[in-house]
Amino acid sequence: MKQTRPAPDIWLLICILALLAIGIIMVYSAGSVLAFRNYGDSFYFVKRQILFAVLGLAAMFVTTNVDYRVWRKYAKPILIVCFIMLIAVLIPGIGVVRGGARSWLGIGSFGIQPSEFMKLGMILFLAHWLSKDPGKIQSFTTGLLPPLGLMGVAFGIIMLQPDLGTGTVMMGASMLIIFTAGARMKHLALLALGGIAGFAALIAAAPYRLQRITAFLDPWSDPLGAGYQIIQSLYAIGPGGLAGLGLGMSRQKYSYVPEPQTDFIFSILAEELGFIGGIIVLLLFLVLVWRGMRVAMTVPDAFGSLLGVGIIGMVAVQVIINIGVVIGLMPVTGITLPLISYGGSSLTLMLTALGILLNLSRYAR
């Protein structure tokens, strides 16, 4: 008699579906004014978001039912394809420029963002590489340096687009995998110092990044320039109070908060649903991260454990950066809120990755 596999973690699945539903509602509420003004259709963004959600859920269903160990076999080819797409983006006539960054491949309004797929591709490869010989990571030259070099090349190509936000999430999730794999703390401390120096150099190399830093420290020093987004975001969050102004009643979405359906959607959510609505969303993310880490700690092999850490790390780092930017604790970086913000590549990729996490939960003890 054929043995049936256990069902995926139900709490993990509930959190994913609840956040996705909230995201669809908020994409319509936050983006309806801009959609009508630019496209003559208040439902423009939400219709596309629903399409991306359906595609993402289909991909999540597939990855939930594919044994996670299969990905180990294809980790290297997937990473190579991700690198090819990243390089193709930089070629004039192939890559598409949107929002000042050459980050897209596609035709017309439909496109994919290869840097989003690189996040998952790097996680899969590092989980495969570092689980082959667990003790090797203790050596800096033969264990730690090769994956760091690979991460550095990917980050460098992403920065040529430029896309500091996505690159930061990829590096953050990758470093969590390396830490979990058993890298020495003194090596990680040296890398942290080097990372800070490199980050400072990146900021100094581009004037707009320096403006974002100064705007973060004192947004009111340039209220109509670099500080505009943060100020308008805080103006949205403040009036929300405890219970909010009511769903659909945001005032800041009327051309005050730029692109309110993407990076700053949480500020509109806080304005309309208040502190209570914001806390509910944060609690859902907290439960998702908790259950995901629980899965990563109880899967039967090192590859599955590192893969789970990478996926949940990608979610956690992205949430922390997005919320930090929206409430003025971090400089503006252009990071979407997972499962909530409008975006095809980011939503589809996130649901695909979470499907792998759900499959891991089938084997967790």
Image: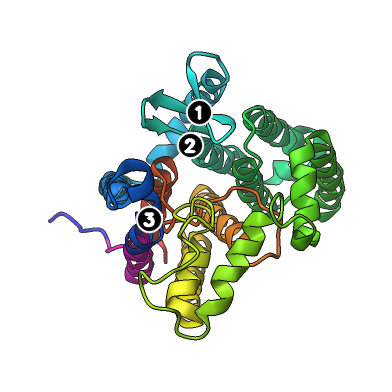
Q: Earlier in the sequence, mark 2 or mark 1?
A: 1
- Would residue 130 be visible to someone looking at this image? yes
Residue at 62%, 29% (x, y): give it: 161
User: In this orientation, which residue lies closer to the viewer: 176 or 295?
Assistant: 176
How many other residues sit within 10 Å of disc 2, few (<14), some (14-19) or many (≥20)? many
Q: Position of residue 172 (x, y in %)?
A: 65, 50
- Mark identifier at residue 82: 1
- Mark identifier at residue 94: none
The chief SS type of the magenta part is helix
Q: Residue furthest left?
A: 1
Look at mark 3 in the image and give the residue it sits on. 33
Q: Position of residue 188 (x, y in %)?
A: 80, 50
Q: Earlier in the sequence, mark 3 or mark 2?
A: 3
In the rendered structure, which amino acid carries the disc numbered 1? Cys
326 on left or right of 296: right
243 on left or right of 119: left
In the figure, residue 171 lies in which quadrant? top right
Q: Position of residue 186 (x, y in %)?
A: 86, 52
Q: Residue furthest bottom?
A: 242
Q: Position of residue 11 (x, y in %)?
A: 36, 71
Find the magenta span and give its range.
6-23
Q: Are marks 2 and 1 in contact (CB under 8 Å)?
A: yes
Q: Is residue 27 magenta?
A: no
How many other residues sit within 10 Å of disc 3, few (<14), some (14-19) or many (≥20)? some
In the rendered structure, which amino acid carries the disc numbered 2? Phe
Residue at 53%, 35% (x, y): give it: 118
Look at mark 2 in the image and give the residue it sits on. 117
On screen, residue 31 above or below 118: below
